[in-house]
Image (cartoon, grey):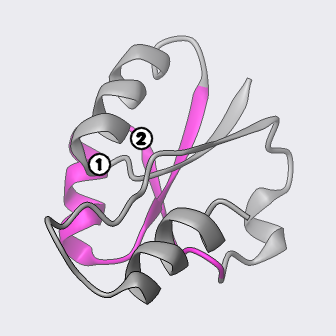
Amino acid sequence: MKIFLTGASGFVGGAVTKQLRDNHTILAMSRSETSDEKINRLGIEPIRSSLGEVDPGQLDGIDAIIHCAAYVEEWGPYEAYHKINVDGTK
């Protein structure tokens, strides 16, 4: 299966990646060079994009999407949580 995963450079997404990478092809969303490095260390391919701005061409051949990216600060503006945690899922 070919999977597009958000949040692979984070705690939850990294754990999901480690569980799936041996039996599946995983492409991981990356928003920065730092994320690229973390994703590369996991042995998967980073795809540069942002939530809500994924080019449909980046999803060609994708069988499943796993959304592990989240805004997880202790507090912050409602808009930030909604944009990432709700709109990002859309």
Q: CA distance from mark 1 to mark 2?
A: 6 Å
- Can you give x and y, in whole percent of width and height, for residue 45 in the image? 46, 50
Q: Depth check: 62 or 71 in front?
A: 71
Q: Which mark is residue 44?
A: 2
In the displayed structure, would residue 38 be above or below residue 35?
A: above
Q: Are marks 1 and 2 in contact (CB under 8 Å)?
A: yes
- Can you give x and y, in whole percent of width and height, for residue 64 in the image? 75, 36
**Residue 73 placement, left or right of 77:** left
Q: Depth check: 51 or 17 in front?
A: 51
In the displayed structure, would residue 12 be above or below residue 23?
A: below
Identity of the residue drawn at 24% across and 75% down: 33
The amino acid beneath tag 1 is Asn
**Residue 10 placement, left or right of 31:** left
- Can you give x and y, in whole percent of width and height, for residue 60 in the image? 85, 56
Q: Is residue 44 magenta?
A: yes
* Few, some or many residues within 10 Å of mark 1 (<14, 14–19, 20+): some
Q: Quadrant of the N terminus?
A: top right
Identity of the residue drawn at 45% across and 46% down: 68
Q: Which residue is mark 1?
A: 40
Looking at the rendering, the stretch of residues picked out in magenta corresponds to 25-52
In the displayed structure, would residue 67 be above or below residue 30?
A: above
Q: Quadrant of the C terminus?
A: bottom right
* Few, some or many residues within 10 Å of mark 2 (<14, 14–19, 20+): some
- Can you give x and y, in whole percent of width and height, for residue 85 in the image? 50, 64
**Residue 57 placement, left or right of 81:** right
Identity of the residue drawn at 65% across and 59% down: 89
The amino acid beneath tag 2 is Ile
Q: Which mark is residue 82?
A: none
**Residue 53 placement, left or right of 11:** right
